[in-house]
Image (cartoon, rainbow, N blue to C red):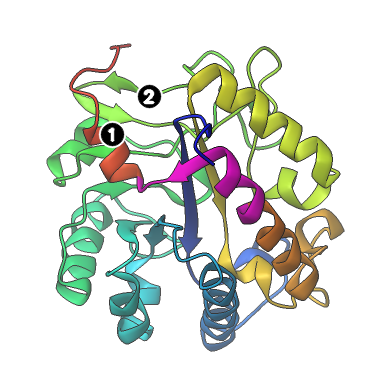
Amino acid sequence: MANKPAYKILLSFDVEEFDMPLEYGHNISVAEQMEVGKRGLDATLQVLAQHPQVKATMFTTANFANHYPEAIRALVPQHEIASHTYYHTAFEEEHLLRSRMQLEAISGVSVTGLRMPRMRPVSMHAVKAAGYTYDSSINPTWLPGRYNNTHLPRTPYVENDMLRIPASVTPTFRVPLFWLSFKNFPFWFFKTCVASTLAKDGYVCLYFHPWEFTDISTYKQPAYTRKPCGELLQDRLNSLLQWLSTVGDFDTIQHFLQSKEQWPKR
């Protein structure tokens, strides 16, 4: 282990109500959204508990935190609490400040980071005014039907005085290293993509959703968003963490960004 490169692993989870079926025209009650989200968080934490060296950034909706305040407080000793705005489905600009203040009240710690649900565009002026120091709402790739951000930087940069850290994509072809890739790519290929990104950038920023790690196989949404899930995906996450532990050190996004005084401006 003495020869392990000084790579940084930025693991993040969007801790939220499970509202994805609504995107596809299928109703799901708020109570069920919360229940699935909480089951997923519990399952995720069971995997993380097998790797006590793992630190992660938990982008949390205030709505979820309001329902499970004790669960959010329990994350604080090991992980970073960041904002995923107030609700996962609805958004108004005022939610930026409201969610930060509510998450701070519940967690008892300072909340400095933001990730918009579904990587929605957001004004950096508004993010700064709401008291955040960084934003992680960029996936610098092309995702059909969602966004085309291939013109944006792959690595951290400053936009309108706000520090932005994109989700990682591979060099050259910008293959996204996010939850859908983790679920649908062969595991060896996902690892290869992560390794090439680590070698180029010195770090990797990965993101997942806790609800993926519980059984969502019966919900009416595209199969590529549902499967694998539950125990199968828990096993894959466990294998990923075992491998990542041999190639780098885990860090929170907040701490990682503080390690460098200046980042390039766009």
Residue 251 on the magenta span: yes
Asked whether the residues under the numbered discs 2 and 1 touch, taking CB atoms below 8 Å apart as contact, a structural biologist would say yes
Residue 76 % position (x, y): 28, 69
Please report the residue visible at 61 percent of the width from the left and 54 percent of the height from the top: 241
Pick out the residue farthest to the front.
2
- Drawn side of residue 129 relative to residue 170, left or right: left
Say which quadrant the C terminus sits in: top left
Residue 199, picture quadrant? top right
Is disc 1 surrounded by few (<14), some (14 to 19) or many (20+) residues within 10 Å? some
> Magenta part of the protein: which range?
241-252
Q: Is residue 143 visible?
A: no
Q: Amino acid at mark 1?
A: Leu
Q: Amino acid at mark 2?
A: Pro
User: Circle 1 is placed at which residue position?
Assistant: 257
Please report the residue visible at 66 percent of the width from the left and 30 percent of the height from the top: 195
- Drawn side of residue 249 relative to residue 184, left or right: left
